[in-house]
Amino acid sequence: MTNRNKGIVLLLISAFGFSMMAALVKLSGDVPTVQKTLFRNLVSAIIAFGFVRYNKERLFGKKENQKLLLSRSALGTIGMVLYFYAIDNLVLSDADMLNKLSPFLLIIFSAIFLKERTRPYQIAAILAAFAGTLLIIKPAFSLEFIPYAAGLFSAVFAAGAYTLLRVLGDKEKFYTIVFYFSFFTTVSLLPFTIAFYEPMSAKQWVYLLGAGAFATLGQFGLTIAYKFAPAREISIFFYSTVVYSALISILLFGQIPDLLSVAGYLTIFGASLYMFLKNNKEAAKQAQAS
């Protein structure tokens, strides 16, 4: 199997892991969002702790990277709380697709903060993706708009976190970054979880611990996939989460996305596919030139 195919398989596994995480979070029912987020990250922190100790790395990274690690973790925590709130209050595939706007927002943030050049086709893809977002949200600016806004802002904060990950690059091991983020989220949400704690049934415990395990599978799969192949060559396969989430929505929750939402999914996926093909075309030209 080629490295590219290994990357694709890992991305498909990662997408399945994140889709199952979202489904289990939704299945856990009427538990406060911060409580769900804490338990999801507690499991990830324990698993990542094992990886860090096994590889004899620093638990909290290098001193010179603390600002980046802390900022990445803070943005990621806010984004995850908003995402879980959207999962609880929207059709699962709607929440998932809104969160998948983060790659488009990453382009904008990279241009603003990292001074990376934005190409015309990327701008076109971003505009198409936001048109798709409007089809999903169908903004009426009523109370029903709040969960959609949470889903949209979860992508904004996720893109901010990914921008800082770009800056971190290879300065830290992936399991150190996962542990730092998961530990930060667990500690920062602990006071809120204690204040608003709701007793959980055995089934809810299983669902949330399972969500943490699947999230870790998703995170590690995603990170390792991009070590086998560049994001521009395989990132489109991560959108398989929307297929998984749509099937889960129908089979487990009886939630069928409306036609406007489906049109929004296709628009955003089309924008992603267009950007994916253009990125590969540019990469091929650069390879021939060199």
Image: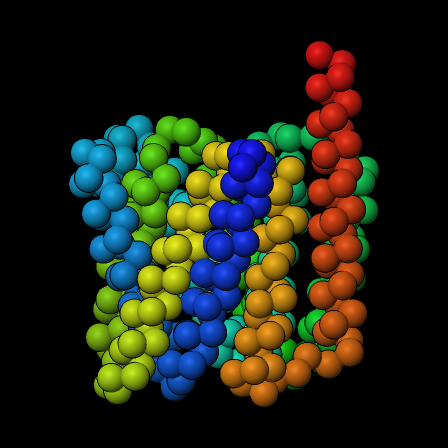
In the rendered view, tell whether residue 29 sits above or below residue 68.
Answer: below
- Horizontal relation, residue 9 to residue 278: left or right: left
Residue 181, can we see it? yes
In the rendered view, tell whether residue 252 sits above or below residue 102.
Answer: below
- Residue at 26% from the left image edge and 61% from the top image edge: 42
Residue 98, can we see it? no
The way the protein has been coloured in the rendering is: rainbow
- Horizontal relation, residue 285 to residue 211: left or right: right
In the rendered image, residue 68, in percent from the top left (x then y), is placed at: 39, 38
Name the residue nearer the viewer: 215 or 84: 215
Name the residue nearer the viewer: 274 or 190: 274
- Residue at 49% from the left image edge and 55% from the top image edge: 13
In the rendered image, residue 251, in percent from the top left (x then y), is placed at: 56, 82
- Horizontal relation, residue 269 to residue 99: left or right: right
**Residue reaching furthest to the front:** 1
- Residue at 77% from the left image edge and 55% from the top image edge: 270
